Amino acid sequence: MKPYLHKFVGKHTLLLLFCFTILSKSNAQSFLFGEKVKWEVGLNFGPSFFLGDLGGNSGKGTNDIKDINFEFTKLMKGAYLTMYPKNWVGIRLAADVTYLEGNDAIINTTGINELWRKQRNLDFKTTIYEGYLALEIFPTMLFNRRSDHEPRLRPYGLAGIGIFHFNPKGSLTDANGDKTWYNLQPLRLEGQGMPEYPYSKPYKLTQINIPIGAGLKYYASDRINLSAEVLYRKTFTDNIDDVSKKYIDANNYSKYLSAQDATLAYKLSDKTIGIIYPGMTRYPAGTQRGDNKNGDTYFSVVLKFGVRLGEIYESSFARRAARQTRCPVVY
């Protein structure tokens, strides 16, 4: 693992440990909410999907669901710790890791719109590390007037703020068909930071996102629960795949990069194959390379396994009473 990833993971691990230490001392009354809070720890896993410039399906390329390439479905894995000051609200601290990928070569062509993207012939992959803090709201619990019963099945919504780290890589294939992947951000393929292209700004590999989602939670017992959840990340970058704006004059690479990096940048910035224009190998400078009207994003569909920590009931009497008066309804 590279140094910056050590720092990224290390900082967030310390943050999780700090929060867990503070939260684990709350067996008494909650200072903020005036009653005993409950804690839950759990794991989650499930498929994640990329929506950006590369790849896609029939028609004009978009960042919509229609352009998901299921061939590039990746597994997201993570862990979370949630505090429940009330039975209708939770405060979640979570960390996840997943992989994203896109490739123009996979596009099935039925018209000219797909041919333009397929001719571009770019690809990318990246690992995503993320951490976020989110608020969970259970509407049926918020309006539940029955103090003697809590339903086992509970829909919820959530929103929060997070931080994620990415590092896009692009590939070159040699004469033997062997593929090698290279970090794209340092190569400044769209002229990032070059005075000739003031519209193209350098981008950071660690950025803020906004997780928004919904789920359905089922309590198998008072301590064990399962959830199915869809979580979308609103990002503020169009560079997860390192494709956003225009092709630049390739002569500028040698002005701002080392000879080795300039050679890589020349090859990786434009891998055009002549489909619409047979024999074409490169686009003229200034030609659209990506669509920066919509930023890149990703989402996941995960199964969550949660365990409640500490005492579930205030006393053994409350435990027996709950067992005897529980209704058979699910929702």
Image (cartoon, helix red, strand yellow):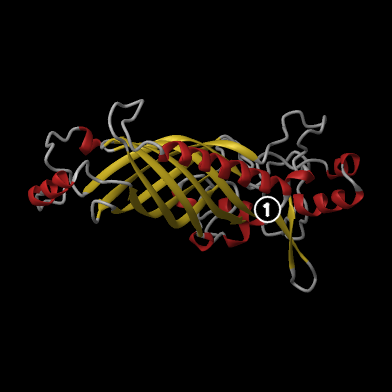
Horizontal side of residue 234 vs 285, given as left or right: left
Instruction: In the rendered view, tell whether residue 173 sits above or below residue 241.
Output: below
Instruction: In the rendered view, tell whether residue 30 sits above or below residue 6.
Output: above
Q: Quadrant location of residue 212? A: top left
Horizontal side of residue 249 vs 22, given as left or right: right
SS of the residue under disc 1: helix
Percent across and percent down for residue 289 are 68, 44
Write the residue at 11% across / 49% down: 326
Q: Quadrant of the N terminus?
A: bottom right
Asked whether 32 or 233 is in front, the reply is: 32
Mark 1 is surrounded, within 10 Å at the Cα level, by few (under 14), some (14 to 19) or many (20 or more) other residues, namely: many
Horizontal side of residue 128 vs 310, given as left or right: right
Horizontal side of residue 3 vs 261, given as left or right: left
Write the residue at 65% across / 54% down: 124
Write the residue at 74% across / 41% down: 190
Residue found farthest to the bottom: 176
Percent across and percent down for residue 21 are 47, 40
Asked whether 216 or 169 is in front, the reply is: 216
Asked whether 284 or 106 is in front, the reply is: 106
Write the residue at 48% across / 38% down: 19
Number of numbered callouts drawn:
1
Q: Quadrant location of residue 243? A: top right
Percent across and percent down for residue 22 are 46, 36
Location of mark 1 (residue): 120
Asked whether 259 or 131 is in front, the reply is: 131
Percent across and percent down for residue 65 are 44, 49
Q: Amino acid at mark 1?
A: Arg
